[in-house]
Structures are given as structure tokens and as C-alpha cells.
Amino acid sequence: MKLDPVTLEIMSMKLSAAASEMAYFLKRTGRTLYIKESEDFSTAIANLSGKFVAYPQNVGVSGFFDLDCGPAIQAVGHLDPGDVILTNHPYMSKGLATHLPDLTVIRPFFHGDKLVAYGWAFVHSADVGGRVPSSISPSNSDIFQEGLMIPPVKLVRKGEIDPVVEGFLRSNCRTPEPNMGDVRAMLAAMSLGEKRVQRIIEQHGLETFENSLGDVIEYTALKSREIFRKIPDGVYEFNDFLDDDLVSPIPIRIRVKMTVSDGLIDLDFDGTDLQVAAAYNIPTAGIRHAQLTSWLTSFVLTHDKTVPQNAGMLDPVSIHTPKGTVLHPIFPAPVGVRHAVVHRVMDTENGALAQALPEFMPAACAGLIIPTVLAEPEDANGDRNVVVVEPMVGGGGAWNGHDGPDGRHSGPVSIGNNPIEVTETGAAVTILRYGLRPDSGGPGKWRGGTGMELTFKAKRLGSQVLGRGMDRFRFQPWGLLGGKPGAQARTILNMGREDERDLGKIDVVDLGPNDTITVLTPGGGGYGNPFERDVEAVLWDVKRGLVSDEAARTDYGVVVGGGVVDAAATEALRAGQPKPDADRMFDFGPQRRIWEAVFDDKLMRRIVAVVLAQPSGGRKAFRNRLLAPLLKALDRYRPLEAEELAELGRDVTRNLEAAEAAARPNSEHQAAA
């Protein structure tokens, strides 16, 4: 490092302040609820290689500071002062844009005639065309169905918006005016960022500024590695599941082997399931990517909130993602609901870290964000209002000494909720209930946080509801060290009425007159034996409506009636309870135990290996033939039955053995040759 410690700290803080000011400016000038309320956007300052050196700390999407602007900049080539690059192409930007609704801009920052840095911003757009309103559907089978793909291109040339590029953008979306309002807010934020960079250079000199762009990243890497040294050296393996990909009933497995050595971490995702013909893929380009490392950044910032937020935080981390898997898909795999897989990656890394640091790490959180979208019918001008009613989350996982947060969890992004008044002003919708979901937090000595409930009805006939990122309807958020799993998710049409119907995971639902829809999110997993929970804590949960009288009795052994604890009955009930299995670190719930009793790690890795050995164009058909018994018999809405699944497992194993035998002569012939 070239700068002295005091100057380095000053430059780090000033760069961070500039990035934060850009973000606040964007929030205040953005057009849509995505920006003004949900805060689904961010800004940053990047060095000349395209790596982020400064990122906002308290506004916008958290955790994106390991993205890389370099490939998009290289794709465009020469940039003049006032130019701005626009892209939303996940594959051509090498994962800078993580799905098509994320409109992303990059502006070169000049000092005089010299290029000194770049500004970056993205906003989640209300719509970029595609098959459905809001563009994202979990059932999209390729990225062409997800909307307009914009390769890195100059949106602004020397300060003037290119009318041709703007015309393409306007003509390929359902919400052109709101889209351009948000884009112009980004452009204004970039202009502000360049002014702030110029001011820093005027105050400290060009040489100090240029040195800071490397030194800040190097300094952050040193601090984060020191924190990673708190993890005992070793190899930790874990896997977790998404329920399915919506278009088939087969779970998606994420598997990691975490190797820790003196503060260096290697994440090997070998054995993770193949990419799917649905929108559950993360476009990482096979490199270390922010959507695979967000749990590690949370680990660092939990230990030391003063660590600068930039690309250096992940320098001690290396990643391996086999090509053709959900974490390294091949174009044109759809990626719209990539955030659902990101959550499960976080849970998987959390499970690995829990083995290393069981007294520090929490149980699983709800593990989802569900942007619940209302798409109203077109008006007389052909325009369509598309809004997020609420970006629903669930409960946080409990940890040693602490209950999980209710209605909130540590996800990959810090998206806020929409105030009911703002939602009802922006759309013809009535919110009937928005609150915490009773009896959803995983029981434990420390209770998992409760999930959420949202019930609403649309006022306009022809309205549609879209659910994105729904999961945990089958496999529950797991409990830790005696704690129980959190409640599963539910989606219900007309809850409490004679025509009530469970919808499960939804794509698009057409609402009839007077229909209501209810989204119930999972709670977080519990930590520790529930029968060791403080009796007064259970009573307090009952009084607040977070735990029912019945759940207090069955889950915690506490007898409550009329808001009072029956001490004698409670003592007797707790004395008769068997002690939990002390050797079982995780409680995954019955559905996962049944699944993994048949489809264990060894079998799943064999399946992935034999399919990846096929030519990429034929893998989908080959996998379907291999798993034909499951595709034919499984029903995502019916609980798994152990005996039936065991028979299906035997059928799949026979198919797998035949495929391996057929491949063996070819490999032997190639080896001999």
C-alpha cells in the first residue's frame, strides 16, 4: 500500500460517502416503487479495471460489491466524457446484470482529459417485455421469454441520450414512462458521482486518488482475511434444496464443500444440480460472483462493521462452479428468479459454517424473497400498471442466546417493504392484512423468527397476481442443535371462505371478482431444545400473538390459559418429554429426511456427473429420461411418502446404472486410444 493509514482511511470514507450520496440521490429521484420504497437499486464507484472500490452502506441493495464492470466496459470500447453504457444482458456482461429487469449503467469519470474511475448503478425495472407482465416468470424456459436483452451499448453519447437506443427500450416494455424515469434518475446520479470524484481529487490530488483505488481494496482484503481466520481450518460440506423448479416436481440441490485454511476460503459447488429449463439459474459466468458470496460478506460485516465495502472483501475467497449447473448456466438458460437460488446458496454456506462455528452461526432463515406483483388490465391508452404489492420475506433463524428476527431475515439484499398507503395509492388494490404469521417460527430454546402474512384483493376485473421466488413449501428452514424447523410457506385463494384453495407455488393467477389472495411466508429455524425455553418468554410470545396456546403446549411444554401459565402442569409436561438427539446438529423436517433417505449425496452426485458428461444440447432430454419415474409420479402438492419414494429411487437407480454402463465402453475405448 502506498498511502499512510490516516490518508487511506480518509480516502476510503470519502469514496464510500460519494457512492452513498449517489444512492440517496437515485432513491429520491426514482420514479417507481421499486426505487422509492423497495430500494431495489444500487450505485458504486469502480476502479479502472471495473472492480468496485466504494459501495453504499445503508441504502439500496446490499452485497453487490463483488460485481465486475470490466467485461461490459471492454465490450463497448472507447468512451468519451459524458458517455454512459447501458446493459441488462446477464451473459454478455458476465453476470454484472443478474437478470433482465436490472437495467445497469456505467459512466466513465474523467478529471480533465484523463479517465480516473467509473460510476455504476442499476435499477430493477417494472417491466422489460417478455412473456408476462413484470417480465419474470419462474416457468420461462429460456431467456428469450424474459424480455428485451440489451448488450453493452452506449445509451448516452457525450452527454446526449441516443434516441435509437431509447426508442428500442421504450418499444419493448409495458411501462415505458416509469422505466425512462428510473433510467434518467440513474443518469443524474452518475453525473453527481463524477462531480464528487472531481472534488475529492481537487482536495487530495490526483496521485493520492489513484493510489487509493488500489490501496482501499488491498486494505479491505487484509481485514476480511483476518476475520475469516476465526473459522477453524478444515473441510465442511453441506447441501440444501429448493422444492422444485415449478415446471417439474423434482427438487434442486445446492451442494458446497468449503475448505478453510488460514483465512483463505475455497467454495467448491461440485455436485450441485444441473441448470434447469426454468428461471432458477444464476448467471455467474463461472467466476467468483456476488450472488455466491453474500453470506460470507455478512459474516465479515457481522464481526466488524467498519470493514470497507468493496471487492477486496472477497479476495481471500475462491470459487468453483461446474459449467452447466444452476450456478453456472449456459446461454440461453433463463435467470429471472435467480434470487431464489441465491437464498439457498446462502443457506448451504450457513450450514457449512455452522459445523465450524455452531455457537456463532444461526439456524436457517426463511430463505426467500417473494416480490408479490399485481398486474392491472390495460387502460384505454394500452398502458398497464405493474406494481410490487409487497416484497415478502420471512423470519430469521435463531442463534445461541437470541431469537430470530420476526418478519425479517438476513437475505442477500436489504430490500424494504412498501407502506400500505403507498401501495394502495399506486394501484387499485385493498390490503386486508399485512402482519406477522403466528406459529411459524421454528420452536427452540431460542425461537426462530415468525414469517409474514399478506392478504389483499384487486379492485379492477382482469387483474393478475404473480409470485416470484416462492419456495419452502416442502423443505422447511432447518433448526440447529435441537431447534425445530420453521413452518412451510403457503399461498391461499380466498382464505377462510367456502371456496378456499391452496395454490402452492404460483406463476400467474387471474383474480375473479371479490377474490382474495394470501401469501404466508416461512419462519426461521429454532436453536436449542424448545423445552428449555424460558417459560416467561413463551408466555410473552403467546401474549403478543406469535405463539398460540396449543403451540405453547405441544412445542414448548408450557401450559397457558387465559394469559396465565399453569406452573404445575407445565413442570409435569416438561418432565415427561424425552431429550432431543444430542448428536443431530440439524433438524431438516420430515420431508427432507424422507427425500435424502433415498436420494442421498452419493446418488445425487452420480446423477449430476453422468448428465454433465453428455453433450450440452442433449442434457435436458437425457436427464428427463433418467428421472422419468420421478417426473411421472411425484406431485409437488402432496407430501412425500417414504415407501413410494424408495420404489421410485430404485427405478431411477436402475436407469442410472444402465446409463453408466452404456458410457463405460466409450470411456474405455477413449483411454485405450
Image (cartoon, rainbow, N blue to C red):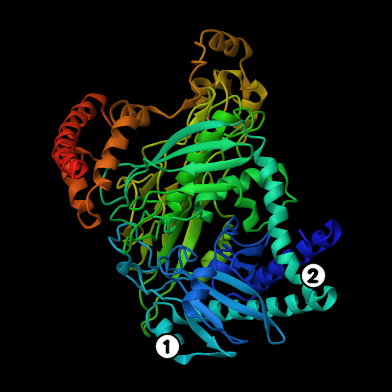
**Separation (CA) of disc 2 from disc 1:** 42 Å
Residue 121 pos. (x, y %): 58, 71
Quarter of the image with the N terminus is bottom right
Q: Earlier in the sequence, mark 2 or mark 1?
A: 1
Residue 246 pos. (x, y %): 30, 50
Taking the image as drawn, is residue 124 in sight?
Answer: no
Q: Amino acid at mark 1?
A: Gly
Q: Amino acid at mark 2?
A: Thr
163 lies above or below 139: below
Q: Nearer the viewer, residue 118 or 21?
A: 118
Q: Nearer the viewer, residue 309 or 595?
A: 309
For image coordinates 43% across by 64% down, the residue present is 99
Read off the residue under disc 1: 167
Q: Secondary structure at mark 1?
A: helix
Read off the residue under disc 2: 208
Residue 603 pos. (x, y %): 28, 32
